[in-house]
Amino acid sequence: MHKQQILIAGCGDVGSTLGLALVAAGHNVLGLRRTINQLPAGIHGIAGDLAQPASLAGQLPACDILVYCAAASSHDEAGYRAAYVDGLANVLAALPVQPHLLLFTSSSAVYQQADHSWVDESSPTEPERFSGRIMLQAEQRALNSGIPATVVRFSGIYGPGRNHLINQVRSGLGAAATPAHYSNRIHRDDCAGVLKHLIDRHLLGKPLEPVYLASDDAPAALHEVTQWLADELGLQIRETRPTRRGGSKRCRNTRLKACGYRFIYPDFRSGYRALLQD
């Protein structure tokens, strides 16, 4: 594979993990974020704010591949629009030439299903929450950009530094068994792994689908996950609460696996076990 110039816009946790894997594969990787002193060695930092077009003007070099994996700085409607819809438009406008590939990281929040049903890339996307609606708008902006583009919809990301559920169980709190609430997740390392797999596929001249749903092999009821964590930690669940999060669905990763991706952590047990050992 020829050495590529790859720009990762919104180069945070997932982006940095991806960037290191791409550097190891011999590519030149540029990481765009507000503070570049947190980037790992090997990724060339570009300081800029996705939401501020003036900070990007004249700063972005030509790239072969653009990976847009921003995270909203505030979890409200304005923060989401700035990060995903406006931010993507600002980066595309600031690039001196169009890349050969755009990968846009989205979210399973675009699915509203709440009846434990299975969802995949062809399932209806009718989100009621602003986060899902804005994500869908950003997906369309990517897919209609005139650049060959692929959207990757990640389910709930966990991994190093994302210990919310572990900390909750450590405090003695678990999810209620009824009503059952299905949850879906993907380890941070698999997020990076999926993106690198799609880039490798593109560089081999193999076609990419417009959308991939990226979630591990094993959707699970949240009470099952919290009880398993408690058992692993040798703790008792002292209180259970119903889950307030919207939707209860099961994400199907058939399309992603059909194109050759193999999960590092195919289920919550393998992923959380690695976290607990660390």
Image (cartoon, rainbow, N blue to C red):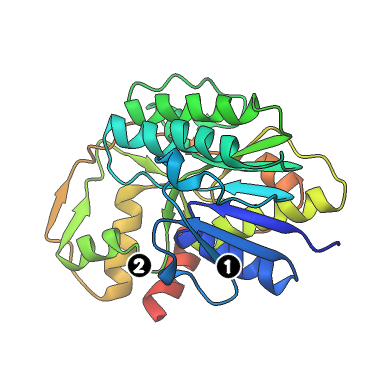
Where in the figure is residue 121, as x and y percent of width and height? Answer: 61, 30
Assess disc 1: are there few (<14), some (14-19) or many (≥20) residues with their C-alpha within 10 Å of its C-alpha.
Answer: some
Residue marked by disc 1 = 44
Q: Quadrant of the N terminus?
A: bottom right
Where in the figure is residue 211, as x and y percent of width and height? Answer: 64, 34
Q: Is residue 3 left or right of residue 213?
A: right
Amino acid under disc 1: His
Amino acid under disc 2: Gly
Assess disc 2: are there few (<14), some (14-19) or many (≥20) residues with their C-alpha within 10 Å of its C-alpha.
Answer: few
Q: Residue at x 35, y 67 (%)?
A: 161
Q: Earlier in the sequence, mark 1 or mark 2?
A: 1
Residue marked by disc 2 = 161
> Residue 224, which numbered label?
none
Q: Secondary structure at mark 2?
A: loop
Nearer the observer: mark 1 or 2; the answer is: 1
Q: Which of the two residues, 11 or 254, is positioned nearer the viewer here?
A: 11
> Image quarter for residue 210?
top right
Q: Secondary structure at mark 1?
A: strand
Total of numbered circles in the picture? Answer: 2
Outermost bottom residue:
278
Q: Is residue 222 left or right of residue 45?
A: left
Q: CA distance from mark 1 to mark 2?
A: 23 Å
